[in-house]
């Protein structure tokens, strides 16, 4: 029996799941849908452009899609262009791998002031996500970034970096222009806990100290005697490496760089200040009841992502995930990746996650309902006038972006607009 499976979400989680399924159950036909015209999800629209090592994961994802086992269809939105009934008609099973693309909420006064942003929105802008505005207000000289995870580092680094140092990346032209005009002098990253409790990872932290013309500033008050206890419960080698990195920066003299990146700790945000726009931010020195204020003109919260509910699919509003047990949702419906387990962990972790989901799906095969019209989804989409893109179309768009880059001695320049991407893909 040929198994027909749909996957919704063409990021790493969806592609890994498809690849693992194709190996475990070779008699399978997999259609991989994404609401965006191009594949790769988080890699294309979440990973910072100056992280070529992580962006390089695209090469293995490309191989997985290029061998023809998994058919990619972009510009198809679940809930709009196809629904659960369509899925049941055409497939034995569906796997949702839609990730987490919204910012977690921070309920403090002033959070909605102009100048207060969510990191996810800024990331979507600098990565050229087609559904976000082309311009970003970069008017602040002093900026606060809230959170001590890798997203906070991405945002802080992208704000602090000089635009010309990003020309080796695939940033779209509008992003280069926007960053080029930024008057920024100081980025202040605030963690609510101490320097021993950061959620950064060593490579990403170290990289911060290597940004051209940016000085790192640490404050002695955040590093009391014995601040790092190697033997404390939960301390990993990663923590030890990062403690050494922070210590090395403490001893480093300022070079007089034109921009500074400050790391502050024990700072719990309590209010964003300003009448009609951000003028500052108020913190509590964590656990002490004592408050202090900081003058900034913009605040970026990088306190975690949050998943979005999908029509007809059970959703846990508290944790922002599809309600599931080991990836099983309801009959014939599965989940994998951040929408299954929440927005934590590196891209590689989605592989083990996908393995679990696929093992459960394969175990369920005898009980899956047979679709009445397998392999006929394209007729349905065409009848509805959906301008879907496909793998061949992506190869065209990919080549087009690379040729745009070549003209300016760059590896690639991303095409941002959705209609332009669709037009090039379907040409
Ligand atoms: P994260 O690692 O969970 O970090 C979230 C940060 O926000 C934590 O420091 C947390 O503090 C803080 N936070 C949460 N609620 C807060 C509040 N109300 N007020 C102040 N601070 C608050 O999440 P992330 O940075 O969004 O990253 C998500 C995942 O993607 C992580 O696994 C990350 O490593 C990965 N990632 C990797 C890269 C890379 O380059 N390798 C880049 C981006 C993301 P507490 O610790 O005190 O809770």
Image: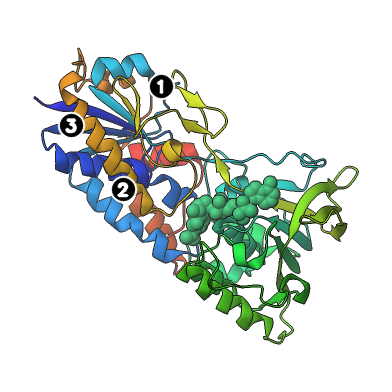
User: Looking at the picture, how far across and down is residue 364, in whole percent?
Assistant: 21, 26
Q: Does residue 145 appear to the left or right of 101 in the view shown?
A: right
State the residue in front, 61 or 188. Answer: 188
Which comes sooner in the sequence, label 2 or label 1?
A: 1
Give the colouring mode of the picture: rainbow
**Residue at the image point whose x is 67% and y is 64% from the top:** 194
**Residue at the image point whose x is 45% and y is 36% from the top:** 339
State the residue in front, 398 or 271. Answer: 271
Figure quadrant of residue 99: top left
Q: What element carries label 3?
A: strand
User: Rounded to the nearest whole Å, what is the CA distance between mark 2 and mark 1?
Assistant: 30 Å
Q: What element carries label 1?
A: loop
Q: Does residue 329 appear to the left or right of 147 in the view shown?
A: left
User: Looking at the picture, how far across and down is residue 371, in whole percent?
Assistant: 21, 16
User: Looking at the picture, how far across and down is residue 268, in whole percent?
Assistant: 75, 53
User: Looking at the picture, how far across and down is residue 128, in whole percent?
Assistant: 53, 49
Residue 12: mark: none
Residue to which mark 2 is pinned = 352
């Amino acid at each position: 029996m040929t198994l027909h499976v749909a996957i919704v979400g063409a990021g790493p989680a969806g592609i890994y799941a498809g690849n693992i399924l194709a190996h475990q159950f070779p008699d399978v036909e997999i259609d991989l849908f994404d609401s965006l015209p191009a594949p790769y999800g988080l890699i294309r629209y979440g990973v910072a452009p100056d992280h070529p090592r992580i962006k390089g994961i695209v090469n293995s994802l490309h191989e997985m899609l290029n061998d023809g086992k998994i058919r990619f269809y972009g510009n198809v939105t679940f809930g709009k262009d196809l629904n659960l009934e369509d899925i049941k008609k055409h497939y034995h099973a569906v796997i949702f791998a839609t990730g987490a693309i919204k910012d977690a909420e921070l309920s403090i006064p002033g959070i909605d002031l102009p100048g207060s942003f969510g990191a996810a929105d800024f990331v979507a802008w600098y990565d050229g996500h087609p559904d976000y505005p082309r311009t970003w207000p970069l008017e602040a000289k002093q900026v606060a970034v809230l959170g001590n995870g890798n997203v906070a580092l991405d945002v802080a680094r992208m704000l602090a970096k000089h635009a010309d140092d990003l020309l080796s990346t695939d940033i779209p032209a509008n992003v280069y222009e926007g960053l080029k005009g930024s008057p920024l002098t100081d980025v202040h990253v605030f963690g609510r806990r101490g320097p021993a409790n950061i959620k950064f990872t060593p490579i990403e932290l170290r990289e911060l100290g290597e940004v051209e013309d940016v000085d790192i500033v640490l404050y002695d008050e955040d590093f009391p005697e014995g601040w790092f206890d190697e033997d404390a419960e939960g301390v990993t080698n990663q923590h030890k490496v990062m403690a050494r990195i922070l210590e090395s920066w403490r001893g480093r003299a300022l070079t007089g760089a034109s921009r500074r990146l400050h790391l502050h700790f024990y700072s719990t945000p309590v209010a964003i200040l300003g009448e009609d726009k951000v003028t500052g931010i108020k913190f509590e020195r964590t656990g002490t009841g004592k408050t202090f204020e900081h003058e900034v003109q913009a605040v970026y919260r990088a306190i975690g992502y949050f998943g979005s509910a999908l029509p007809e699919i059970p959703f846990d509003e508290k944790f922002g995930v599809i309600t599931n047990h080991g990836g099983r949702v309801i009959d014939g419906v599965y989940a994998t990746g951040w929408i299954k387990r929440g927005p934590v962990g590196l891209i590689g972790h989605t592989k083990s996650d996908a393995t679990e989901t696929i093992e459960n799906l394969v175990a369920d095969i005898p009980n899956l309902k047979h679709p009445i019209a397998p392999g006929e989804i394209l007729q349905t989409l065409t009848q509805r006038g959906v301008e879907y893109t496909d793998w061949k179309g992506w190869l065209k768009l990919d080549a087009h972006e690379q040729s745009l880059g070549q003209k300016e001695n760059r590896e690639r320049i991303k095409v941002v607009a959705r209609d332009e991407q669709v037009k090039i893909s379907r040409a």
